[in-house]
Amino acid sequence: MSTAVQAPPFHLAFPVTNIAATREFYTSLLGCRVGRESTRWIDFDFFGHQVTAHCVDQMPAVATNPVDGHEVPSSHFGVVLEWSAWHHPSGPLEGRRNRVLDRALHSLSW
């Protein structure tokens, strides 16, 4: 039994340069549902939270910090899953876990 406190949903907005590719990543790879959208932004239900991708013409520079020997972008977010949910075959990433990891690792500069 989990003793975690139920937190209210949060909203996070972030820049992207390609709405179609962003939609594909969040829907097909992570299994997120689409909420409202326009030609320049799209909302996703990200594990019960609202994240919004806003299309920009050029990505802003992102500062990094060294973490475990890698330069990690200081602007990042993710969902923290319990170990059993991450590895359970009918969990939230059913059949997509390795593709999520591959995509995340290839997007970093390490």
Image: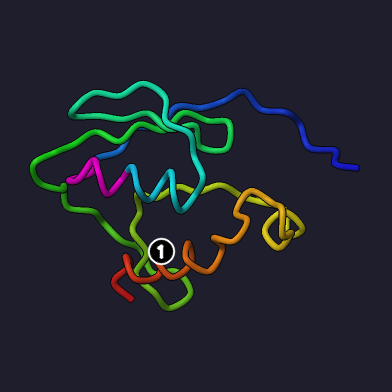
Q: Is residue 29 above or below residue 53?
A: below
For the point 48% across and 74% down, which residue is it? 68
Could you tell me the amino acid type at mark 1?
Ala
Instruction: Tell me where residue 18 appears, x and y as whole percent.
Output: 19, 45
Quarter assignment of residue 89: bottom right
Q: Which quarter of the figure is the N terminus placed in?
A: top right
Q: Is residue 100 above or below residue 48?
A: below
Instruction: Tell me where residue 9 appears, x and y as whole percent.
Output: 57, 25
- Please state the extent of the stretch shown in magenta in the rendering: 16-22
For the point 16% across and 47% down, which residue is it? 60
For the point 35% across and 63% down, which residue is it? 65
Determine whether, in the image, residue 62 is placed left or right of residue 58. Answer: right
Residue holding disc 1: 104
Q: Is residue 49 above or below residue 21?
A: above
Instruction: Tell me where residue 30 appears, x and y as whole percent.
Output: 49, 49
For the point 24% across and 33% down, which residue is it? 54
- Magenta stretch contains residue 6: no
